[in-house]
């Protein structure tokens, strides 16, 4: 399977990822990624990352998932989302966005890692 694309830049409201156009929020997984459109599944800071938000990562073969909390740690993760990942035996890292980017890039060297990244609050 393909490697996960590296994040080459992160700043407030802007991310750059190998092979993708720059943007604000991203879903990344082995072999690619795309912009993360919160309106797809009704994601908001609270209650947070929805189970459907991580399904695409699972569908793309991730064995490790990094979930960012935003730069100001405002983005939550629903307990149901964590339960789904636990049920699939997925290793999960939940961190402030800049720390999440560092973890993701390190994991991408040796794992089939995916992530959800929010570059603002």
Image: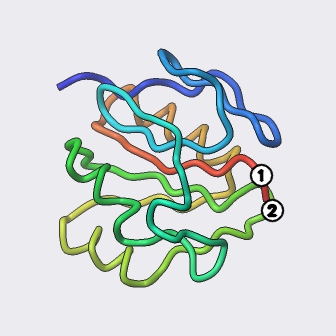
What residue occupies the far front of the structure in this picture?
A: 39
Residue 113 image point, x, y percent: 35, 41
Above or below, comparing residue 85 to residue 9 in the picture? below
Looking at the rendered structure, the secondary structure element under dot 2 is loop
Which residue appears at 49% of the width and 39% of the height?
Answer: 104
From the image, tell me which residue sits under label 1: 120
Q: Quadrant of the N terminus?
A: top left
Residue drawn where x is 58% and y is 21% of the image: 21
* Residue 17 horizontal/vertical position (percent): 56, 24
Q: Residue at x 42, y 37 (%)?
A: 107
| Residue placed under numbered mark 2 in the picture | 72
- Whether tag 1 and tag 2 are in contact, CB under 8 A, the answer is yes
Q: Find numbered disc 1 in the image and state the secondary structure of the residue it sits on.
A: loop
**Label 2 neighbour load within 10 Å: few <14, some 14-19, many 20+:** few
Q: Residue, x 47% and y 52% (percent of image)?
A: 66
Which mark is in front, 1 or 2?
1
């Amino acid at each position: 399977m393909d490697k996960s694309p590296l994040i080459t830049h992160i700043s407030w409201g802007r991310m750059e990822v190998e092979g993708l156009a720059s943007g604000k929020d991203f879903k990344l997984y082995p072999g690619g990624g795309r912009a993360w459109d919160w309106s797809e599944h009704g994601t908001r800071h609270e209650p947070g990352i929805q189970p459907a938000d991580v399904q695409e990562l699972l569908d793309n073969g991730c064995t490790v998932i990094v979930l960012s909390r935003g730069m100001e740690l405002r983005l939550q993760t629903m307990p149901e989302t964590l339960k789904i990942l636990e049920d699939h035996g997925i290793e999960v890292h939940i961190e402030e966005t800049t720390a999440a980017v560092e973890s993701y890039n390190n994991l991408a060297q040796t794992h089939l890692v995916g992530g959800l990244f929010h570059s603002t609050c």
